[in-house]
Image (cartoon, rainbow, N blue to C red):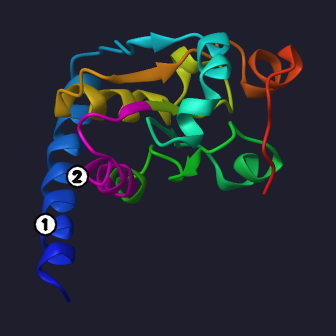
C-alpha cells in the first residue's frame, strides 16, 4: 500500500470518528440544525461546474434510489445514517480538494427530516467546510428536482 493511500485511509478514519461524535452530540442535544442550503435551481444551473470538477455532488441516500435517477455527476456514497455510511462520506470528503465546493443530498424524503442528510450535514459542519451545502429538497428528489424538469442521470 502506497504512503498516499495509507495517509488517506488514516485521514478518513480520523474524520469518521470525529463525525460520529459530532452526530451523536447533535442528536443528544436534540439539535437538527442543517445547512447551509442550496436551492435545486441553483445546482441545476451549475451542472457544467459539476462536470468540470468544481463542484462535488455527494449522494448520501439508498442505493436503489440513486439508480433510478440522480443529479448528473453525483457520486453515490450510500446511506449516511449508518457508521459505515459516515465512514464512506468521510473518505469521499477527504478526497475532495479544499477549493472544490461540496453539495450533499439524499432525496428519499423531506430533507429536514431525512436520516441520511442530518449526519451528512453534521459532518460538513464538523469539518468546517465553508464551501459545502445541503441540496434543499423540501419534499423529495422526484418532486423537487425531476418534476421541475432538471437534468437526471440514471445508472
Q: Earlier in the sequence, mark 1 or mark 2?
A: 1
Left or right, 54 with respect to 28, comes to right
Badge 1 is on which residue? 10
Say what secondary structure mark 1 lies in.
helix
Badge 1: few (under 14), some or many (20 or more) residues near its Cα, within 10 Å? few
Q: Where the N terminus falls, by quadrant?
A: bottom left
Q: What residue lies at 68% left-to-right and 33% top-to-bottom?
A: 108
Q: Which residues are magenta?
A: 87-102
Say what secondary structure mark 2 lies in.
helix
How far across and down, in percent of the image, does residue 47 sit?
A: 63, 29
Q: Is residue 133 magenta?
A: no
How far across and down, in percent of the image, does residue 45 sit?
A: 66, 17
Disc nearest the viewer among 1 and 2: 1
Left or right, 53 with respect to 92, comes to right
| Rendered position, 88 above or below 38 | below
In which quarter of the view is residue 107 placed? top right
How far across and down, in percent of the image, does residue 65 sit?
A: 74, 46
As measured in the structure, the alpha-carbon distance from the residue carrying label 1 to the one carrying label 2 is 10 Å
Q: What residue lies at 23% left-to-right and 38% top-to-bottom?
A: 98
Q: What residue lies at 28% left-to-right and 35% top-to-bottom?
A: 123
Left or right, 74 with respect to 145, comes to left
Badge 2 is on which residue? 16
Q: Where the C terminus falls, by quadrant?
A: bottom right
In which quarter of the view is residue 7 placed? bottom left
| Rendered position, 96 above or below 143 | below
Badge 2: few (under 14), some or many (20 or more) residues near its Cα, within 10 Å? many
Q: What residue lies at 80% left-to-right and 23% top-to-bottom?
A: 150
Amino acid at each position: 500500500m502506497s504512503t498516499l493511500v495509507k495517509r488517506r485511509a488514516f485521514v478518513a478514519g480520523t474524520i469518521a470518528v470525529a463525525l460520529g461524535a459530532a452526530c451523536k452530540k447533535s442528536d443528544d442535544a436534540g439539535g437538527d440544525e442543517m445547512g447551509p442550503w442550496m436551492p435545486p435551481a441553483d445546482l441545476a444551473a451549475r451542472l457544467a461546474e459539476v462536470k468540470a470538477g468544481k463542484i462535488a455532488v455527494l449522494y448520501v441516500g439508498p442505493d436503489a434510489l440513486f439508480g433510478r435517477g440522480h443529479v448528473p455527476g453525483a457520486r453515490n456514497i450510500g446511506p449516511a445514517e449508518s457508521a459505515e455510511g459516515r465512514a464512506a462520506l468521510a473518505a469521499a470528503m477527504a478526497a475532495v480538494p479544499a477549493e472544490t465546493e461540496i453539495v450533499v443530498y439524499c432525496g428519499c424524503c423531506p430533507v429536514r427530516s431525512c436520516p441520511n442528510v442530518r449526519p451528512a450535514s453534521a459532518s460538513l459542519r464538523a469539518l468546517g467546510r465553508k464551501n459545502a451545502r445541503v441540496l434543499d429538497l423540501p419534499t423529495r428528489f422526484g418532486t423537487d428536482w425531476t418534476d421541475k424538469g432538471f437534468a437526471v442521470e440514471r445508472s
